[in-house]
Amino acid sequence: MQVHELVGTVHEAAWLPWAVQYFFLIAISTTALLMTLPVLALGRQGSLPLARLALMVAVTTGITAPVALLADLHQPFRFWHFYAFPNLRSWMAWGAWFVPGYVALLLGFAWAVHRPQFHAMGQRDWRFAWLFRWLSLNGAGNGFAPLLGIGAGVLALIVLMYTGVEVFVVRSRPLWNTPFLPLQFLATGFVGALGVMLVLGRALRSGPAVETRLNRLLAMWLLLVAGLGAAWFIVSMSGLSPRHSEALASVAGFVVWQRIAIWGALTIAVTLLVALVWPHRSGWVTGLLAIHAAWMFRWVVFMGGQAVPKVGSGLYDALMPTGIDGLMGVIGTFGLWLFLLIAYTTFIPWDEATAPARPARLRPAPVPARPV
C-alpha cells in the first residue's frame, strides 16, 4: 500500500486588494497623461476635447493611486522608512521616489495648463476671485508647461516600467515572472484609461466625434492585448521557454482558471466588436467593459496569482473580503476618486484648457508676402 499525503496551508495574502486598486489607478493615470502630451504639451494638431478628458482622468486617478498604495503597506504610517532607510536593491524602494515625483510633476503640469483660466477667473467680480488669483499666482503665462509635461511624461513611462518590473522580479511565482507581464500592464493600462474617458465623455457630453476617436483607440489597444495574450499562450504551449511553460502548468489544471481565460477572451472580443461596429454611440458599453477588463486583469494577476500555492495542492482562497482590506477598501477608493472628479469638474475650467502659447522667439518667423 502506498500513501500519498497532500499538504495544503492557509495563509493571508501579502498583497491585498488595495494593491489591485493602486496598480489599476496608477496605470490609468500614467497612460492618460501620455495621451495629453501631443496636444497640451507639444501643441500638435489633435483632438483637444480628448486631451482635456485625458488630463482630468490623469489628475484624479493620479491623486487617488498613492492613497491605495499607502493602505496596502499594512503599516502606512511607516512609509517614511523608505526615505530614512533606503534599499536601492528593491524595486519597491525605488517606487517611493518615482511615484511622488510623477504625481508632483503631473499636478504642476495640470496647474500650468489651467493657469490662464485661473487668472481670468481671478479678474471677475465674484466671491471666489481671490482664490483663483492665488491659484494663478497673479499671472497668466504658461510657456513653461511643455517642460513640466515632458518631465511628467518621462516619469510616467518610468512608473509604468517600475510597476511591471516590480511584479516580474518575483521569481518564486512563475505566473508573474514572465516578460509579457509588464507589457500587458502597459496595454491594459491604456484600455482602462480609454474606458474611463469613454464613460466620462458620455456623462459630460463630449460629442460623437470624441467618442468615435476613443473607441478607435480602444480597439487598437484591445488588439494589442489580445496579441500579447495569444503570444504568451503560444510560447507557453510550445515549450520554447521553460519559464512560460511552468507558468501555464501552474494554473492550467484548475477549472476556475480555464473559466477566467474564457471570460477574459470573451470580454476582449465583445468590447472590440462593439467598438468597431458602433464607435459613435457605444461609449457606455465599451467604456464599462474596458474598465472591467483592466481591473479584472490586475485582480487575477495579484489575488489569483497569490492563490496558486508555491508548495502543496489546490488553490488558496482568493475571494474578495468584505472588510476595509477588501470590498470596503475598493468602494472607498472609488468614492475618493469620485469626490476628486466632482471637485475637478466643479472648480476647474477643464473644458477651456488649451495648448500653452510658445514664447515669441520659438514661433516660426512669418513668411514675407511676395510682390505682385
Image (cartoon, grey):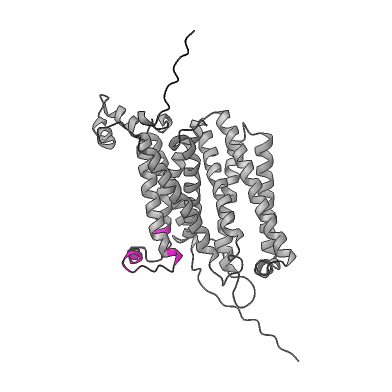
Report x, y in % for residue 285: 61, 40
- At a point 37% along the width and 66% down the height, the residue shown is 75
Magenta span includes 214: no
Considering depth in this image, is 243 or 148 the residue closer to the camera?
148
Residue drawn at (63%, 34%) of the image: 279
Q: Residue furthest bottom?
A: 1
- Horizontally, is 218 left or right of 121 in the view? right
Quarter containing the N terminus: bottom right
Query: Foreground residue, 372 or 117?
Result: 372
The boundaries of the magenta stretch are 69-92
Residue 109 picture location, percent across and down:
38, 41
Q: Position of residue 364 (x, y in %)?
A: 43, 27
Front in this rendered view, residue 50 or 289:
50
Single out the residue that lies furthest toward the top.
372
Magenta span includes 90? yes
Task: Let me know if residue 183 appears in the view.
Answer: yes
Residue at 41% x, 55% y: name it.
Answer: 99
Q: Is residue 24 above or below residue 271?
A: below
Task: Specify the quadrant of the image occupied by residue 250.
Answer: bottom right
Above or below — where is 151 with respect to 365? below
Residue 365 falls left or right of residue 189? left
Q: Position of residue 47 (x, y in %)?
A: 52, 31
Examine the rendering and report whether any part of residue 343 can be seen.
Answer: no
As drawn, the residue found furthest toward the front would be 371
Where 337 sits versus 249, above or below? above
